[in-house]
Amino acid sequence: MNGTTEETTTAELTPGVRIPLIGLGTWPLTGEQAAAAVSQAIASGYRHIDTAENYANEAAVGEGIRRSGIERGQLFLATKFNTGWHSRTGVRHAFDEAVRRLGTDYLDLFLVHWPNPAQGRFVEACHGLQELVDEGSLRAWGVSNFKPAHLRLVQDAGLDVPLNQVHIDPEHGQPGQLAYHREHGILTAAYSPLGRNGSFLGHPAVIGPATDLGKTPAQIVLRWHVQHGRVAIPKSANRQRQCENLDVFGFALTQAQLDAIDALETGAPPRLDSDTYFH
């Protein structure tokens, strides 16, 4: 582990922009539940909040941020837009609407939520995002659910992709996807990092380190993510679990323990196929 808080709890996204390695996922929270969860998480130490147009909770997330009393500059705020905005002018409109709903004047990270390759306009959307960064309204951009083939088209258009948010958990390790990210310097953010009722949380590869280190199985899996250099975005509205999910920096897994969790990979694809699923 690195020796400073900055190095161990954040990663460099682009020059001068660092992203906290643990973020608060907010889907499927809406309304007061979302606002309360965000405010509570910020009070517990979270500085990275992740939302999306399609979650229908951006206004509630913004309310939670205001309720927390935190200065905007202390927070890393990420959201995503739908495929209806896949054009340069569309991205600009999506940005304007997102910041309006969130009640802020800039975003730290704005993501193409799904590539929708049949529509064939995600490269244009990425160009629009880069223009917002160049203008200073947006600190960094990225994509979500992009397969290597989708990423390659963006790169062939002369753009460097800073981050791809994809479904990664011990049973859905996507080794080919991660290898592509490493080869091309793309930071990985894992959504559903603890799976959905993942049986792996009860596997000896997870339970063993949890017992040895006095940690929860979820903490072990989140530590596995961040020790591999990934951002992880677990969702919880429960204060205790929020605090536990954030508390993954005071210990380290051995290489053997990391390897054992890696070995839980089943070869299963992500839950949703981004060649056909989108919104």
Image: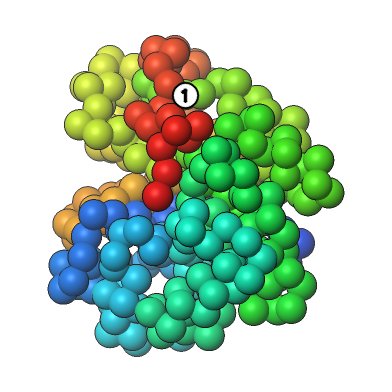
Q: Residue furthest front?
A: 119
Residue type at the position of mark 1 = Gly
Nearer to me, 239 or 109: 109
Q: Quadrant of residue 139?
A: bottom right
Taking 38 as reference, is 210 above or below it? above
Residue 214's spot in the image, x, y percent? 27, 35
* Residue drawn at point x = 72 percent, y = 44 percent: 154
Q: How are the colours assigned in the image?
A: rainbow
Can see residue 269?
yes
Residue 94's spot in the image, x, y percent? 51, 70
The tally of labels here is 1
Asked whether, in this view, residue 17 is left or right of residue 242, the answer is right
Residue 159's spot in the image, x, y percent? 78, 51
Nearer to me, 158 or 9: 158
Asked whether, in this view, residue 32 is left or right of residue 80, the answer is left
Nearer to me, 272 or 29: 272
Taking 76 as reference, is 22 above or below it? above
Taking 87 as reference, is 148 above or below it? above
* Residue drawn at point x = 35 percent, y = 40 percent: 192
- On the image, numbered disc 1 is attached to which residue? 173
* Residue drawn at point x = 17 percent, y = 57 percent: 238
Can see residue 251?
no
Residue 90's spot in the image, x, y percent? 57, 68
Q: Quadrant of residue 117?
A: top right
- Is disc 1 placed on a helix, strand or loop? loop
Residue density around tag 1, few if under 14, some if 14–19, many if 20 or more, within 10 Å:
many
Q: Quadrant of the N terminus?
A: top right
* Residue drawn at point x = 28 percent, y = 22 percent: 200
Nearer to me, 218 or 93: 93
